[in-house]
Amino acid sequence: MSPTVRQRSKRMILDSIGVGLVGSTTPVFDIALRYCRLYSSVAVSSVYGKPGVKLSPTLAAFTNGVATHSMDFDDTWHPATHPSGAILPALLAASQMLPPNTKPNGLDFLLAFNVGLEVQGRLMHFSTEAHDIPKRFHPPSVVGTLGSAAATAKLLSLSSAQCCHALGIAASLAGAPMANAATQAKPLHVGNATRLGLEAALLAGRGMEANPLILDDIPGCSGFSAFYSVYQPKPLSAPGEHHEFLLEKQDIAFKRFPAHLGMHWVVDAALSVRNLFINYAGSFSPSLIRTIMLKIPVSKYINRPFPSSEHQARHSFQFNACAALLDGEVGLGSFSESSIHRQELRELLDKVVVEHPEDNVANFDKMYGEVALLLHSGDVLTGKCDTFYGHWRKPLSKESLLKKFRSNASHVLPEEKIEAIITLVDNLENLSDSSQLACTSGAPTTSLQEKFLHQQHIPNT
Amino acid sequence: MDFDDTWHPATHPSGAVLPALIALSEAFPQKKKISGLDLLLAFNVGIEVQGRLLHFSREARNIPRRFHPPAVVGTMGSAAACAKLLALDQLECKNALAIAASYAGAPLANAATQIKPLHIGNAAKNGLEAACLALQGLQGNKQILDMESGMGAFYTDYNPQTLPTLQSYPWLLDQQDVAIKRFPAHLATHWVADAASSVRRKLVESSESLLPIDKIEKVILKVPEVKYVNRPSPASEHEARHSFQFVACSALLDGSMSVQSFSSENIDRPALRELLCKTQLEHPPDNTPSFDSLYCQVSVTLRDSSTISDRCTTFYGHWRKPLEKEDLEKKFQSNVLNILPTESMEGIIETVYNLEKVEDCSVLSTFLSGQSASTSREAALPLSVPANSYVLFTKSMQNSGQTLA
């Protein structure tokens, strides 16, 4: 560092300390400090799969959000986002935070959850860009954060002005670029969305104020529009008695295996052509295959010929097609280190060629997957999938959904707990204390914590 | 309060970095001391990274319109600075930056609201978090600075370049100083304040005299077009700090601006409101919205049709006209006056001026907590550092069975 650099930077350090100190006399500082002391130090919220572990509400939400998206196994909506992971952890954490006599019941919880979903959907409908597979910002980090703020604000019964500010604050906490998809950092997007939305609602509950027009499109000074190149907000009709939730018209897709949604089309196509091939050749014989042709939409972050990590493998059309061809199914185990680096799989990957037909749009409502096996003999076998099983056009049956849940939960929970959760959720509207849902894996709060909760955690309405 | 420094290309560099470094330095176990030089170097790394990233976009040279720069580059700077202080290896540093990118970005529309300060708070916090996650082994996209879908997401014209070699590395701060504010408001208002004060001196004989508002027909401000600082009638302190009109009228009324100019009594003064009604903005095409080239002209037209004007191209505190040492210290002292004892105040000044020679920069924290110099030299710090803060700095050992200390 030259003398100039030293001198200048020391001046900066001095000035920065000074303005920070005088800044500690401001109301915004009071709110931030109170928030940090109150909500960060009391470990009252449960963590998925870790009975006995409790964290502060925002960190519990964060951790659980990360868990939800860690394997890319969570739900996907249209327009594209992962809606539930961005809101459920915040609601669970918040429900445990509230004092015993004000615990939200199951219906409140379910309603708050749906508010969070609805807000995400409505925001995405303000941008035509949002209808396609994203390229710039990862949607959960954009709309998910606001959805979490809305859901939490609803659960905490904030006033309408406070709800408005919660959304405004959340906008300043939103936004993560796509480039971290297919890396270990991607799950943080959902973790942060749910955590920061909760934070925004808590801050708003404490009196913090933001720009009430943040969702409007004001040229020259971007609000929420900062995250889109085309943003056209429309006024929404006030929710009367017959408000129709977007979820009514547009269902969600549930994944059958832990990989990016786009993979599900090629896997179903690959399984279909595999069957044809077995009928043709008697067994799956890779040596008969000259080329594997994939017809997929254009989307850079899921086009990976030779993924080298689990995260990359979950975001690779090529890998998922080949795993399906080789094994006859794709599941949790398909993405282990040993599975990814298998010689036979690598050999198949070598044969893959990718095409982007013009009619195959990068959009979860319209795309298709096609897998063609070009054999040495000259014969061509093709499998095509327009709608995979689990897509909103072909939803998972109740049995399939429960099978997925039991299989996932059995990794960490005993059978009674698993069945208890299934029963709780099935009867959610009739539950009197929704924090039971969060507690099913943890120990009940001690009386000391309960006392603290009672004194400190009621937001200023 | 919008009182912190501003750089060119535009961001508030120090606030995003220093709090993270100070917090981190207090979390180190007692036997692992951080020297003043370590702190100074890490600070400069954090500043440099911000500057370099801003230079990758032409859009960044102008006053922002979409994302608030501290939320974008500030988060990256904080991650870099913390990674430096934590002595992360090269791979971990890359991951720290990659992770930080996923925390970056806040839209500009929350400027002039109470939430704007959180942009800097979160930049500092999130950068620190990113560095700590990297230390724990978390990995992100190591090409994130190169990609349109990485840092490029925040700009329409992102064009990264290779940096100069480390052999004779030129620090940006060497070529381009920061601006330090004299009063707590958006930087663009500082030109207006200087021009308005100068016009006032021409209007009244002595500084004690009241401004003859009745004789004023109109006040015209020639300013660059910056929507979020154009507020004819601000209603809150946050709005007032982002209003050309408010600062011009306050400076005309009072002769100069200070922290008190933004109190609610002053914001609501009838005399001020009256003057605001007479104030208009004009945006000459040659007045570009860049902190390096903008100017402000204040013209007061009286009822007798005479006009008194002044133009300010470089305000005192701007990088072209930096604050003198005495004035920088005066600002510091005035800020700290009722918050820390005099001894701490002087201790901080002395420590910062000699930072490279300080052996253990925890003295800075001691002064900040208001303890006296004598107790700070006894350095009774172990009490504030619990044994399991070790956890922060122990990497997860994946292959060995070693548990955290």
Image (cartoon, rainbow, N blue to C red):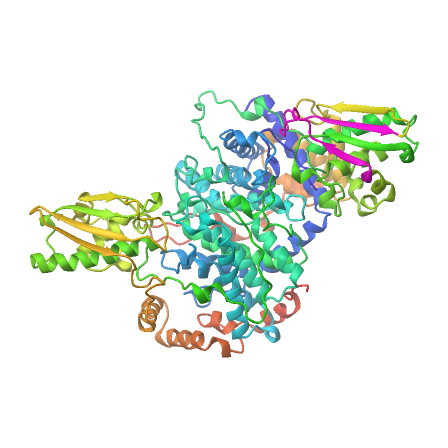
For residue A308, above or below residue B62: below
- Percent position of residue A42, x then y: 57, 62
Q: Write down the quadrant of residue A280 in the picture.
A: bottom left
State the residue lying farthest toward the top.
B168
Q: Is residue A338 magenta?
A: no
**Quadrant housing the N terminus of chain B:** top right
For residue B365, above or below residue A74: above
A79 lies left or right of A122: left
- Percent position of residue A134, x then y: 41, 47
> A443 or A360, which is in the foreground?
A360
> A391 or A306, which is in the foreground?
A391
Q: Write down the quadrant of residue B320 in the picture.
A: top right
Where are the magenta residues, as a range?
B276-302
Q: Answer yes or no: is residue A112 visible.
A: yes
> B384 or A401, which is in the foreground?
A401
Residue appearing at x 44%, y 65% in the figure: A249
Q: Answer yes or no: is residue B371 visible.
A: no
- Percent position of residue A189, x then y: 45, 51
Q: How many marks?
A: 0
